[in-house]
Image: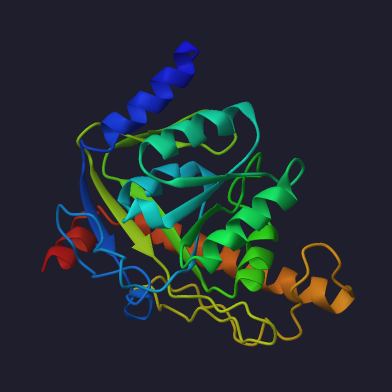
Amino acid sequence: MHGFAAFFRYGLLLYDTSYRRLSVIPEAAKPFVGTAGIWNQKPGSMNSLKPAVYAYFHGHMHVLLGLTPRERLTLIVSNSRDGEMIARAAEDMGYQVARGSRTEGGVKGAFKLLGAAGSERSILFPVDGPRGPKEVVKPEVIRIAQLAGLPIIPVVARARTMDKMKSWDNYNCPYMHSMMVYVYGAPMNVSAGAGAGAGAGAGGGAGAGTGAGAGAGVGTGMGDENAGDKEGVEKLRQELETYMLALSAKAEHFFDQDVYNDYLD
């Protein structure tokens, strides 16, 4: 293994045991995620919880450090060289990996994900990967969730002390032993004909404010939508992106003194 790949792989595993965790989970997401307000612990066991599609930004890859049990989570990873490093690290951490991307092996990866969903596993999906643009949600996450019949739960992460790398995704690199917060959104129903609204402020005050009814007429095809289906998927894509950006802004300010103190109270 090349030096950088080894550094990424084993460095991530070192981070995995070195930091403290907080979770902010809205009431509607608890059947999928676990107990809210956990101090110095991972979110509660998902053994008895419902499966979902977890949507996260590529630059927030450290969300992987806070989800359990990992043996019931499947991560979609691109077929790129960077994806190979991520896949090896994720497998070492206990995740199942499905390789695929928008341009190479995507159909194969999609079928692996659907197989995971059929086994009551949750899916982890980097919505702006594998090459960006940064924090622009791709439509594939909507289509996968529709085919799997699962809701989408957005999740963002923020470290109290961290650096942003000079990469396309401005990867958030947390400092060792830094306090981390995971902010989850309310479940987003993207099934055909569903009103997709995640709800204004459902994520504990996230305030995305996205509208209902965006999912009318949404299809379930992976590449054969008619014009109406494409329009429905695009509305859902925009809604998810808006909601995730609102959650990200909330996480960005979580460690401001007044917000942090309110959480501890």
Height in image: 65 above or below 213?
above
Q: Is residue 145 left or right of residue 19?
A: right
Give how far across and how far down residue 51 sits, in percent: 44, 69
Height in image: 253 above or below 28?
above
Q: Is residue 187 left or right of residue 92?
A: right
User: Is the C terminus in the top left, top right, bottom left or bottom right quadrant?
Assistant: bottom left
Query: Which residue shows up at 40% across the image and 70% down it?
Result: 206
* Residue situated furthest top in the rendering: 3
Number of marks drawn: 0
Q: Is residue 177 left or right of residue 98?
A: left
Between 17 and 48, the residue placed more toward the observer is 48
Give how far across and how far down residue 242 sits, in percent: 57, 66
Residue 25 in view of the camera: yes
Query: Which residue shows up at 72% across the image and 86% down it?
Result: 216
| Colouring of the image | rainbow
Residue 252 in view of the camera: no
Between 57 and 120, the residue placed more toward the observer is 120
Query: Which residue shows up at 56% across the image and 30% down it?
Result: 84
Height in image: 197 above or below 102?
below
Height in image: 41 above or below 202?
above
Give how far across and how far down residue 140 sits, in percent: 69, 59
To which quarter of the image does residue 214 belong?
Answer: bottom right
* Residue situated furthest left in the rendering: 265
Give how far across and how far down residue 244 sits, in percent: 51, 62
To which quarter of the image does residue 172 belong?
Answer: top left
